[in-house]
Image (cartoon, rainbow, N blue to C red):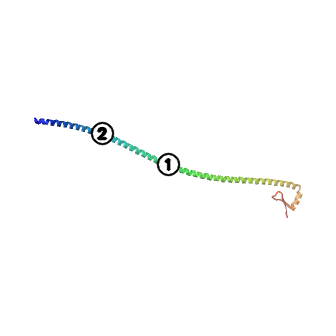
Amino acid sequence: MRSLDEMRPKIVELTDAKLDLAEQVQSAQRALKERDTIIEKLEASVDEYQSKEADSVKKWKEALASKEREAGSVHTDFAELQNNYNQLQEELDTALASIKTLEAQRTTQHQEASRRVLEIDRLNEAAQAQLEELSNVRDELDARRSAQVRFAPAVTNCLKLSCVYRTKSKESWSVYRTS
């Protein structure tokens, strides 16, 4: 029995060690479970963050594509506006050139009209002078005719000898002989 007595402390010691080891195993298993739980949570968080990142990247790419389309559209619109501006500028330049040409023509026509008005005034004055001269000549002719009727025999004799002509000057008379 001696051996049993000797073994008893060893058995108690081994039992204590076994209990310690069982506790350590349980503690290790709990730690492993906690670790697995933490890993699962971390993996879920990583998956969630990766999903969010994928969504963010997708949204960013969509936004970038949209902005690129808008930029392309803006560039196209700008090019179209620039083209329209250039066309309008050409039309404006053409219109301004036409206006300058029309102004020059108007000035020329105004000068021509002024010249013609002066010419018409000059011709009216000349016509008036000629009318006055014609009136004077008619009066003189009427006077001569009435004098001729009264003095017809004397004038007939006078005409046989000479002709009376009136020159342009109203004061002077010239007598020419006819043969």
Q: Give the x, y percent position of residue 156.
A: 88, 59
- Whether residue 120 sits left or right of residue 19 in the image: it is right
- Which label number is shown at residue 38? 2
**How many neighbours does mark 1 have within 10 angstroms: few (below 14), some (14-19), or many (20 or more)?**
few
Q: Which residue lies furthest to the left in this view?
A: 1
Mark 2 or mark 1, earlier in chain: 2
Q: Which residue is drawn at 59% across and 51% down?
A: 96
Question: Are dots 2 and 1 in contact, CB under 8 Å?
Answer: no
How far apart are labels 2 and 1 at the CA level? 57 Å
Crowd class of label 2 (few under 14; some 14 to 19; many from 20; radius 10 Å): few
The amino acid sitting under disc 1 is Phe
Residue 76 coordinates in the image, percent (x, y):
48, 49
Tell me what residue is drawn at x 33 percent, y 40 percent. 45
Classify the position of the N terminus by image quarter: top left
Q: What residue is at 55 percent from the left and 51 percent from the top?
A: 89
Residue 145 in the image: x percent, y percent? 85, 55
Of 73 and 9, which appears nearest the observer?
Answer: 9
Q: How many labels does the image show?
A: 2
Residue depicted at x 26% and y 38%: 31
Q: Kindly identify which numbered label has been placed on residue 78.
A: 1
**Regarding mark 2 in the picture, which secondary structure is present there?**
helix
28 left or right of 144 in image: left
- Quadrant for residue 47, please give it: top left
